[in-house]
Image (spheres, rainbow, N blue to C red):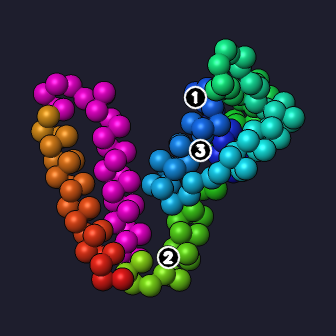
Amino acid sequence: MRHFMLLMLKTNEMTGTEIKQEFERRTRGVWSPGPGSVYPNLAELETYGLVEKIEVQGRRTPYRLTEAGRNHVKMLMKRMPPEPKMRMISMLWFSFMSPTNRALHLVHNMAFGVDSLMELEPLLSKKEKKPLLTEIKEVRNKLTKITKMLEKSD
């Protein structure tokens, strides 16, 4: 969990609540770490000198990477497993699933890809934006229908 927290803080300062919400968003609600996980991990990262609190007025305290934290993230990125290894781990896990859960897993992965395409919206020209977003929304709606059908059959 700590490594993922560091990766999240690589680009943005975040509060513990925002980190929790980002875990939920990235796992599509499958994993929702509680405050008993988030804050002790942030405290540990702070003890190691990898993150620091930003002093602000009010109740929310954002965290950011320190220089040591940025260096640690660079090292983590170099150690990330190569694509074939990640695919092998995923295939092994996939092999233990029931056919319905396999289908749900695949549909959720496709939906995640579609949602990732939506994040490109600011980069699209006006000419590209409307037709592409219309198509993306249609695909997302179809995937939602497939998911509901699979969930009913389970």
> Is 140 one of the magenta-colored residues?
no
Q: Nearer the viewer, residue 78 or 48?
A: 48
**Disc 3 vs disc 2: which is toward the camera?**
3
Query: Which segment did they paint magenta?
Result: 102-129
- The residue type indicated by label 2 comes to Phe
As helix, strand or loop, the secondary structure at mark 1 comes to loop
- In three-dimensional space, the C-alpha distance between marks 3 and 2, rounded to whole angstroms, equals 26 Å
The residue furthest right is: 47
- Give the Cα distance between marks 2 and 1: 32 Å
- The residue to which callout 3 is attached is 20
Residue beneath the point at 28% across and 32% down: 121
Left or right: 3, with 150 as reference point: right
Q: Is residue 122 magenta?
A: yes
Residue identified by numbered label 1 = 11
Residue 80 screen position, x and y as percent: 65, 50
Q: Are marks 2 and 1 in contact (CB under 8 Å)?
A: no
Amino acid on which the number 3 mark rests in the picture = Lys
Mark number, residue 68: none
